[in-house]
Image (cartoon, rainbow, N blue to C red):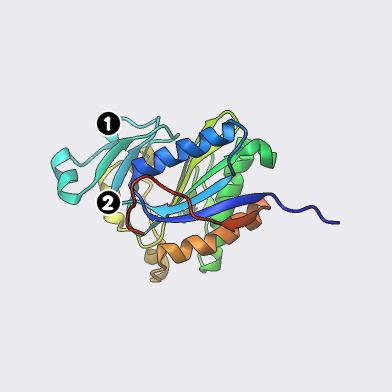
Amino acid sequence: MSRSLPRVRASWLGSVPYRQAWDLQAELVRELREGGGQNTLLLLEHPHVFTMGKAAVADHLLWDEAERERRGVEVVWSDRGGEATYHGPGQLVGYPVIDLSRLDLSIPRYIELLERSLIDYLAALGIESEPGEPGFTGVWRQGEKLAAIGIKLNRSVVSHGFALNMTTDLAYFDGIVPCGHAERRPTSVAAITGRRVPVQEAAVTYAGNFAATFGVEIEWAQVAVGTPVRS
């Protein structure tokens, strides 16, 4: 008799402000650390926001406060790894909140699989991509970044995750030094292929790639997130 696959709950949250999604992750991490809870894959998009990871510095913000206000961009200093990045409409954000010990994964192996799941998803769209060189996490195509990855480890529980540019307005990346490297520019699925894949459609398809890559079974469920927001 074959052994059943580990289960991961997946939820499409729609558009969620960064701080609300951050608070939700913290609650899911707490539940897992206390021995309960479920491994969860949160899929969503954010309103315009620059997030500053632990390695970010103020000089990575290139737009002043007035310009950020004009463009409706919030700034949040986050507890994830990495430097500055941008989130906004048209970008698929994935936050796997996973107890790595339940899946017998190390951090390097987890990041490797997360990159592979995105590479496989992009391949189905006709895009050849690759993981970054040593020191450059994420998913790249011909030196341009398609997906950023930044995670946080709390004992054996990982949170935060990836941001994949689908139909993202890439001009917003001009407001920061992306991931601390001004010479490394972003790109998107739309810029490469001309296709404008809706983020929710991308989320549903990508969940299948996540399941196949990590060897888990996806179960879709609703996950409450703070004050109701646009879906």
Provide the residue designation for mark 1: 58
- At horizontal 25% and vertical 43% (from top left) the residue drawn is 74
- At horizontal 26% and vertical 48% (from top left) the residue drawn is 174
Image side of residue 83 versus residue 29, left or right: left
Q: Position of residue 76 (x, y in %)?
A: 31, 37
Image side of residue 225 versus residue 60, left or right: right
Q: Position of residue 49 (x, y in %)?
A: 30, 45
- At horizontal 39% and vertical 60% (from top left) the residue drawn is 188
Q: With respect to residue 194, does 157 lie above or below?
A: above
Q: Residues within 10 Å of mark 1 (few under 14, many from 20)?
A: few
Q: Residues within 10 Å of mark 2 (few under 14, many from 20)?
A: some
Image side of residue 198 versus residue 100, left or right: left
Q: Position of residue 133 (x, y in %)?
A: 53, 44
Q: With respect to residue 59, does 98 lie above or below?
A: below
Image side of residue 91 versus residue 204, left or right: left
Of residues 82 and 46, the one nearer the viewer is: 46
- Among the two numbered marks 2 and 1 on one chain, the one whose residue lies closer to the N terminus: 1
Count of numbered labels shown in the rendering:
2
Element type at marker 2? helix
**Toward which corner of the image does residue 108 lie, by quadrant?**
top right
Q: For residue 85, say whether it is visible.
A: no
Residue 172 numbered tag: 2
Q: CA distance from mark 2 to mark 1?
A: 17 Å
Q: As shown in the figure, which amino acid type bears the numbered disc 2?
A: Tyr
In which quadrant will I find the N terminus? bottom right
Q: With respect to residue 46, does 26 lie above or below?
A: above
Q: As shown in the figure, which amino acid type bears the numbered disc 1?
A: Ala
The answer to the question of whether label 2 and label 1 lie on touching residues, with beta carbons closer than 8 A, is no
Element type at marker 1? helix
Q: For residue 199, say whether it is visible.
A: yes
In which quadrant will I find the C terminus? bottom left
Q: Position of residue 107 (x, y in %)?
A: 60, 36
